[in-house]
Image (cartoon, helix red, strand yellow):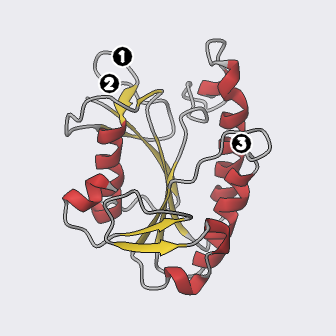
Amino acid sequence: MKEAAARGLDITAVVREKNRTEAQNVLTKDLFDLMAADLKGFDVVIDAFGAWGADTLPQHSTSLQHLCNILSGTETRLLVVGGAGSLYVNPGHTACVADGPDFPDAFKPLAAAMAKALTELRRRQDVRWTYLSPAGDFQADGARTGSYILGGEELPLNSKGESVISYADYAIAMVDEATKGNHIRQRISVVAE
């Protein structure tokens, strides 16, 4: 939201409670209560839904399905804040980050839920979606460098062999995709230079 606001974009936040964003336009509504009319006229919807508890993890699929259903057949793009666990680690695309021995057990249920949601999203040919996965090390307080490298289905690495990106640089990539990207029905990834 900060990145989009800094660029002077016309943004609307959808919040369940109090608006804590830079958005001047606010729609106070639960994601699951949104209807097609609520999103009519938007160029892009960015889905930053998050759930971490065992009882709420299935909502990664149900929330994305709901958004797809209400955007079905429209020109509105759906950009999804994705996860890194489902990124492939081999050229044959048979092994994912979450399959590795060093992937923390605590994050495996979340990675599995997000991977399931992505698999379901890939079946939607009626929605103009893009799924943006961060690098493996997604740093909330990392520095905003202003640059990144765009990748595809495999875990992105920079020239130092690292897979790291800050939230701030990820936001730059997301807003770039929203304003000038065209990765329709694709999963892309991003890593810091």
Return the mark for residue 161: 1
Residue 28 versus residue 63 in the image, above or below: below
Crowding at mark 1 (Cα within 10 Å: few <14, some 14-19, many 20+): few
Q: Is residue 47 left or right of residue 145?
A: right
Crowding at mark 2 (Cα within 10 Å: few <14, some 14-19, many 20+): some
Label total for image:
3
For numbered disc 2, what is the local secondary structure?
loop
Return the mark for residue 158: 2
- Quarter in which the C terminus is drawn: top left
| Disc 2 + disc 1, Cβ < 8 Å | yes
Residue 134 versus residue 175 in the image, above or below: above
- Quarter in which the N terminus is drawn: bottom left
Q: Residue at x 20, y 34 (%)?
A: 145
The disc labelled 3 sits on which kind of residue? Ala
Return the mark for residue 31: none
- Of labels 1 and 3, earlier in sequence is 3
Viewer-side residue, 8 vs 137 = 8
| Disc 1 + disc 3, Cβ < 8 Å | no
Measure how far apart labels 2 and 3 are at the Cα level.
Answer: 27 Å
Which residue lies most toward the top here?
A: 101
* Residue at which label 3 appears: 113
Q: Is residue 187 left or right of residue 59?
A: left
**Where is residue 30 shown, x and y percent of the image?**
62, 68
- Of labels 2 and 3, earlier in sequence is 3
Which mark is in front, 1 or 3? 3
User: Which of the 4 image quarters holds residue 42?
Assistant: bottom left
